[in-house]
Image (spheres, rainbow, N blue to C red):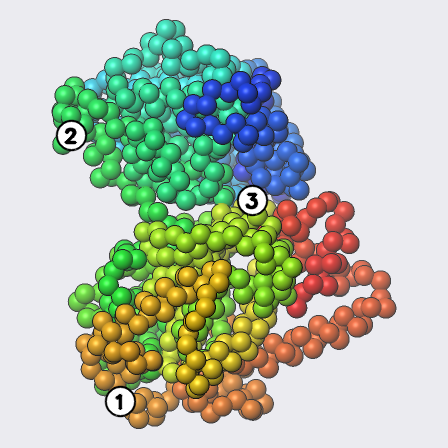
Amino acid sequence: EMMHRSLCTFLTIGVAVGLNVGHATRPISRRASSAASMALKLELDPEEASKLLEEGPAASQGPFGKGGALEWVAKGLDDVAEVTLAGLHAFDDKEVQDSSKNLQVLWSRATLAKNGELDDDVALQLLPESTRSVVSAGLFDGVLPFLEWVAARTDFLNQGCEAFLSSPSCADGRDCQIVIFGAGFDTRSIRYQREGLRFFEVDLPETIAAKACVQERYKAKVDPSARLPTRIGWDLNDCEQSSLLDHLEEEHGFKRDQPTMFISEAVMFYVNPIAIGNLYDEIFRFGQETEAMYCFTDSMRPFVQGPFADETREFFRKQNVTLLSHTSRWSGAVQFAHAVARTPAMLDGTGAHGGAASSLLEHVGARVEPPVNSYAPERSGKRPDAEPSFNNHWYAVAYSSELHASSPYSTRLFGEPLVLQRKEGDEVSCEAVNDGIVYAAADHQGLVWVWRGEVAKADSNMLPTHPTPEATHTVETILDYGCDWTYIVENNLDTPHLYWLHDGSIPPIESLGCNRNNIGGIGLRFFTDDIGIGHIGKTSKKVTKVVRYDSPNVVRHGGVSGFSEEFNIVPIGPHRTRVLLRQRFPKGPILSALLNIPGTREVLQYLVRNWNYQIALEDYSVMQGQAHNIDDFGAPNWKATSNGDDLIVKFWKWYRKANAHDGHGDERQAEYFTRFDGSRVSMPESAAAAPSPIERPTHREGESVMAAEEAARGMRPHYLQAAPVADYPPINHAFYAKQQSWMTVLDKIMEGVPKVGIASAIGASAGLISASLNPTAFLTSVAAVEHIEQVVDALP
């Protein structure tokens, strides 16, 4: 029995991971076409479409697709999934056996539903009776972490269905339609049973034949009253020459005068661009005559390339469609979109079911989260055009993991000593040490926040929020600087300094081509999104890079890869700053698998934190010199500007306006030792406030400098006597320097030893993690031993 369970679990991992990366081998039919023959509907770019036609739909899969560095992974896992599913359906109907591989999603949904992760009471009943006990017995439970993508897209489409069906256009038994492209073994047509509703499920003929067996079996054995959908065997690539909607109307009873919802779920990867363009043209033109809603959890390439809402919104706008909700996955490879056609008859009040007040557009818009044009994942209720001020903002002051119920936590904000205390659950409190004034505080998404303003006006909607934190793996780093917070903001807004100063000093920066030889390859464009201002541009390796400033004190870096980092730059006091640096790595199937291997999280954390320490030390030396020239000698913040400096200038202008608005005038560092109401904080009392004792820091190994006399030797007294104690680099770099000396010794020892054993193990760990984060840069072949050794040699 144990062997059976282990085998099933192993095979199911293949199914689950294959589900995430194995799209490339699904059968499709393709027709030879030239770029010149393309109808340029929907502004289809001929060159881009021609490239996709040459490479096939698998080109949308990134490193897992055709020619990608991890194509072999996708193929191998896909083969495992095929064998496993063939075994599970060995005694099923022949049509189902022939299409068993396409039941991956059905098995996944049954597993998710069994564990309460998904509301679907039909999926299990569609599986063969002889093997569905595999799900019921929990043999597939071990692969739940791999199924987040299936759960997310199912929940999103369910939300759209419920909004559409509850609208005035469909409620009370009114006739309406739902068309599902690439329906596979979707269960919505059975789950959403009601009078007047008709489903049209479109998929490849062989898939439709298998689904007919499964659905008819369900009707016969489970629910004889079930109304089954209209099933249409149709290759979506046929849309290149033929009209799908005409076919539905002529052969299957589709009505062009009934409100219709179009669902596209993870199918357009397999369809050529011309066919996609023709299909889109059809369904969007339909919406100009009849109410229509569009729910996509799918690729929209080549029409929408990136992950940002503004590009998706603009695409829909050109089709006279309003985007009502949006997010994206995997660098924009998949768009999650709810959109509704701006049907003229409904907007002018002449529609069949009421005018603008009861339109489908308004009904759905009130029930879904509106899209946010944000070039970084995090968003909040704060607007970039708000009056500059240091007040009425949330400031991150600690990581949630730093607070313990049994002990207070000491810190400062703008020089004022504060004490934080964890209460029950996620509730935290914040008081001023000097006089006991209470500040509003919140524990939100791994950070503890303090509101600089009246407690009654603390607005939780302004807390920066990541929409899908569960889809990322986070590494937290703390950095302590002995300079003013403004210089750290400026440093992190300055993209070109990555090339000049850091010059490829750590592997991630080198992989982006950020070295002095490539300084001429930087291209930056200023933007303003719904949250902040920033730059978007390309590195010399043509990798999209985003830098955004969220006033007053947060800088965000990211791009289209899904990786992002946020710098919460905490003004502790004059010439003292703590940075809470949080880096998020997208949980693709490979990284998800690696994180389940014991020790991988620790290795990844060690590498990332040490890279951060190295960069911080390099920056710190420059910022100290900059502060000396400006603060001590009166040098201007800027005089002549070059590439990228416009964003820095905007920050300094914001800073001066904020001080003026808050009544501080033009005096530098006037924001310290004042409160939101203009009252002053006593500097002598603040200086006398001693920090709570700390034995061990939470975010590094070893003792705190408060407890280790040797570590504290040579540090300035105020780094030890004022909270928070400077336990981290670049101020306290002793432990990091010791680590580097160990690495130097190890390198010398290994020079005369064959590169096997522990060194190869370290290299393999680094190589695996690097491959999972940036496969195209770090993994170029299966036999990558030499390449892994190069990665190890490049470590700081």
Residue 301 is situated, as x and y percent measured from the top left of the image, at 48, 33
Front one among 458 and 410:
458
- Identify the residue at the far top of this view: 250
At 41% from the left and 61% from the top, the residue drawn is: 647
Q: Which marked residue is nearer to the observer: mark 1 or mark 3?
A: 1
Spatial CA distance of label 1 from label 3 is: 54 Å
- Tag 3: amino acid: Pro
Picture disc at residue 589:
3
Of label 2 and label 3, which has the lower sequence position? 2
State the quadrant of the C terminus.
Answer: bottom right
Front one among 337 and 34:
34
- Tag 1: amino acid: Ser
Picture disc at residue 356:
2
Mark 3 nearby-residue class (10 Å; few <14, some 14–19, many ≥20) = some
Residue beneath disc 1: 682
Residue 94 is situated, as x and y percent measured from the top left of the image, at 57, 15
Front one among 436 and 608:
608
